[in-house]
Amino acid sequence: MTALPRELLVVEGARQIRDGDLVIVGTGLPLLAATLAQKTHAPGAKLVIESGVMFPKVVPTPVSVVDPRLMHGASRHGSLFEALGGLVQRGLVRTGFLGGAEVDQYANINSTTVAGKRLPGSGGANDIASHCSQVVILTDHERRRFPARCGYVTSPGFLGGPGERAKAGLGPLRVKVVTDLCVMEAEDSALTVTALMPGATAGAVLENTGFTPAFADSLDTVLPPDPEELRLLREEIDPACVYFPERIAR
Amino acid sequence: MTALPRELLVVEGARQIRDGDLVIVGTGLPLLAATLAQKTHAPGAKLVIESGVMFPKVVPTPVSVVDPRLMHGASRHGSLFEALGGLVQRGLVRTGFLGGAEVDQYANINSTTVAGKRLPGSGGANDIASHCSQVVILTDHERRRFPARCGYVTSPGFLGGPGERAKAGLGPLRVKVVTDLCVMEAEDSALTVTALMPGATAGAVLENTGFTPAFADSLDTVLPPDPEELRLLREEIDPACVYFPERIAR
Amino acid sequence: MHKLLTASEAVGRLVAHGSVVGMGGQNINRCPMALVHEVIRQGVGGLTVVGCNLSLPLDMLVAAGLVVRTEQGTGNLERYGTLFAWRRAVERGQVTVGDHSHLAMASRFAAAALGLPYLPTRSLLGTDLLADMVASGVAVESVDPFGGRPLVLVRAMAPDVALIHANRADTLGNTVIEGVTSHEVDMVRAAKVTIVSAEEVLPAGAFADRPEQVTIPEAYVTAVVEQPFGAFPTSVYRAYDFAESEIKEYQAVGRTGDEELRAWISDNLGASFEDYLATRDAGGTLRGALSDRMRSLV
Amino acid sequence: MHKLLTASEAVGRLVAHGSVVGMGGQNINRCPMALVHEVIRQGVGGLTVVGCNLSLPLDMLVAAGLVVRTEQGTGNLERYGTLFAWRRAVERGQVTVGDHSHLAMASRFAAAALGLPYLPTRSLLGTDLLADMVASGVAVESVDPFGGRPLVLVRAMAPDVALIHANRADTLGNTVIEGVTSHEVDMVRAAKVTIVSAEEVLPAGAFADRPEQVTIPEAYVTAVVEQPFGAFPTSVYRAYDFAESEIKEYQAVGRTGDEELRAWISDNLGASFEDYLATRDAGGTLRGALSDRMRSLV
């Protein structure tokens, strides 16, 4: 069984979750990754959903943060203020998964507007990037998605560079960007490529990135998913291929 | 049927409640007064209890703000923050009933400490006096209870005098003090005697007041309770004489 | 005061031209569709629509030309895409936008719900999002006087009227919501008046044996409207799932253009929400299926 | 982590000398007596006790000589009088006091519960109460930057450990409280750790079919202790009324003096809360009567 590129992305995303973490996710690939983590190495990881759902037992496959499939068997059905104020701003949620139209070299995120085009906006993203200690971004690796500097900073990474996050009054953060080409990491710094996806090259990364990322001296290759991870993903977590139309295509 | 002095106090207290008012009360005589108002001229008056009870159907006779008799048939069982923040500070509660060891000529209240003696403290009193537009105080008329200036201001009346409440950032307030001797009123002013209890004299008021109150030109006499008011009070609201031991004594 | 009204009476009395409308629901869940349809039928315009996530009801109001401004955390339907009418109106400059993080917006409602001029937050710091909020006068940068750290103060938001849809209400306005409540409880406590539509309206005091379970007490509710499936095609937890086919159709029309959306609205809304439901789901088979699906999910 | 512990285990692990203890309950309702008795048995001292209304549990801790400071809105038992041990200790200067209004105290807990350094309030203005809070560093006078009006900022209060008693909990810590919750939910969300004692402890996920009804989710609960009548002689809504005779006896002893209170404590607390209940109500007839009375009241 060989993994599709986006399946690899989900599996590598799942590996960022520690057992026992509180994790705030939306829907889509991040939710698949978090659910996979719960079914493999992190059975004690707990999900928090910005709409007010705490610790649900996810029924496949939610398409919205208020999808009844995401409210099933929860510890509590509360409010946005409880989830984003009482848990995230309170500092109890270690890991947050985020997306965005643009991610720049200092891991700032733009989900508000690109070139006059109106995007959905922050939602809980700014709150998650402001208060979680680890942010994981799963995204296709396209040049336009990785500019040197976001046209608009919706959610803070390291802002203008080292030290700026602390200067702004924000706590320390660790960012991991997982794409179909590589893994990039940053901690009060610019994003550095620390691993390549199986078969991907440094050249391909440079070609598809709007800035010139540094590469770690010891460049790892991401471990391919084991068959059980793929089975869980395909048979239990997204059996209807809601987020993997390409799987039907095959 | 002639009314006891403290029964008169309760009945006159009830008359301060308008139909439709939201009224915040503790227990004791104020709760009896509010319940009497609901059973007579103000059936639409609603009770708010600081512990988080909204709009209860009182079962005789609660002795605490968390007494199950005060939680019966409520609109909601919530929190202190909901009652004092979401209703009182929010400005939705027109009338508040307060007590206190000292009430001074500017209707400031002391419930914290008198002459080195430790008292219970503010509780919700400061919040009620800060945010309600009408405060009603029911108290025995004793000289020590009515000093010119409270030794400690726990809850704000008109502070140092006219204009000071607004200067401090507090909204307008109307205060009515009902005692076994008289009714005193103030609105951004010192307390003025506006009515005497049946049989009471201006001399008795002056003798038992630590400051020298002004008297209204047209000094009313408080209307004695009608038989139905007394019947309700004695048979339905406090049948066990929890707050009227003197009724048993007779 | 008698609170039980029809949607037409409630909207006619409580939603005025130029109102700031607090919008209930989120994404595909518990949107107050019946009340919003009535606002469209009565053509109440010049509206500022505020909420956390704004979705289907906002897009319909914008398509109907009734909205001049929105203040929100997000405007989209997640997997079902952007709000096409809203996006076009914003890009044309016909609708102005005040962006927030969801916590910032929830904090603005909570401030007003508590009778406070603002609440602090540690979100927003260092971003263009904060700069825009400061420029529009809804946020100021501050410093914590106790610890000395930077802090943002977000201004209280008190809607003129809040519109929500709930599982149940009694005739006094006591309201029970099942599932998450998003931003709605504080928004309602903050609003000057509130209209609650509910799947079911029960006699006064119906919840008095379990007051802890009342989500919103009568003190905050001005009018109650009974409307089964009043959130259709969005979901109501434990009552019915959302209607994906309906949402996809609306989005397909929305993608084509504003004219097409206006045509869809006039073809489908009818004279009442019951008309609309009959048009979209004549025999009620879709609604039956959505109820069955929800039963299988809870 | 396994959360279901005995009172002795939970207090032994989570309440340390010098802790700031957030006290649950109010007046004669749902005071965490079983947990407080255990603190007394283990003689954990140097405590700062914080809450809105502090009543019976505080007075016992003070009588046992374990308290150095209190921060609260009120200290009393309403109709049953003052807290004699506390009042004497305060008047002797053995216990220092930080006075608040109830809203100010609730706001301090809410601030910490939201991860904020303070919350604003429009209470306290112009009073000696404010002056004392400013002097002790828990409040500062401020001005609303939006409207220009005076405002008070009250400092976040995060107890080291919160002690509460509830109707039900599951083994994961999900907790259901019936009746009012006073200041407890925000106090628990603010606290570093929390011990919940409950009338009944149910299997994990016992409330998962009605998550809206969970008052405090497991995320905030460190330890769960099962103790029927764990609030006796105070009440638990829908379970049992308060025991007036017991409260009056305690107050009668308290009036006489600290020595007498200490004797009462050592004569009655015993080796466990079950011991204590057996001492005070051998056959359980009083407890039965309190349960019956509550049934007649709800």
Image: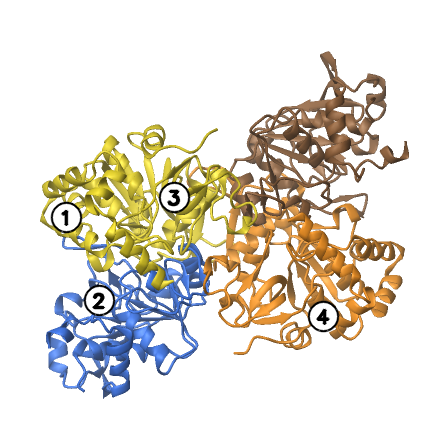
Chain colours: A brown, B blue, C orange, D yellow
| Disc 1 residue type (three-letter) | Gly
Which chain letter goes with mark 1?
D
Viewer-side label of 3, 4:
3
Answer whether labels 4 and 1 touch (C-beta < 8 Å).
no
**Secondary structure of the residue carrying numbered label 2:** loop
The image quadrant that residue A211 belongs to is top right
| Disc 3 residue type (three-letter) | Ala
Per the rendering, the mark at residue C154 is: none
Q: Tell me if I can see residue D12 in this picture.
A: yes
Which residue occupies 22% across, 56% down? D244
**Secondary structure of the residue carrying numbered label 4:** helix
* Residue that label 4 marks: C39
Viewer-side label of 1, 2:
1
Asked whether B128 or D276 is in front, the reply is D276
On the image, the x and y values in percent for residue B77 come to 43, 59
* Residue that label 3 marks: D198
Asked whether D217 or C210 is in front, the reply is C210
Which chain letter goes with mark 4?
C
Answer whether labels 1 and 2 touch (C-beta < 8 Å).
no
Viewer-side label of 1, 3:
3
Above/below status of A188 relative to D298: above
Asked whether D78 or A70 is in front, the reply is A70
Q: CA distance from mark 3 to mark 4?
A: 49 Å
Task: Evaluate whether label 2 is on the same chain as label 4.
Answer: no
* Residue that label 1 marks: D254
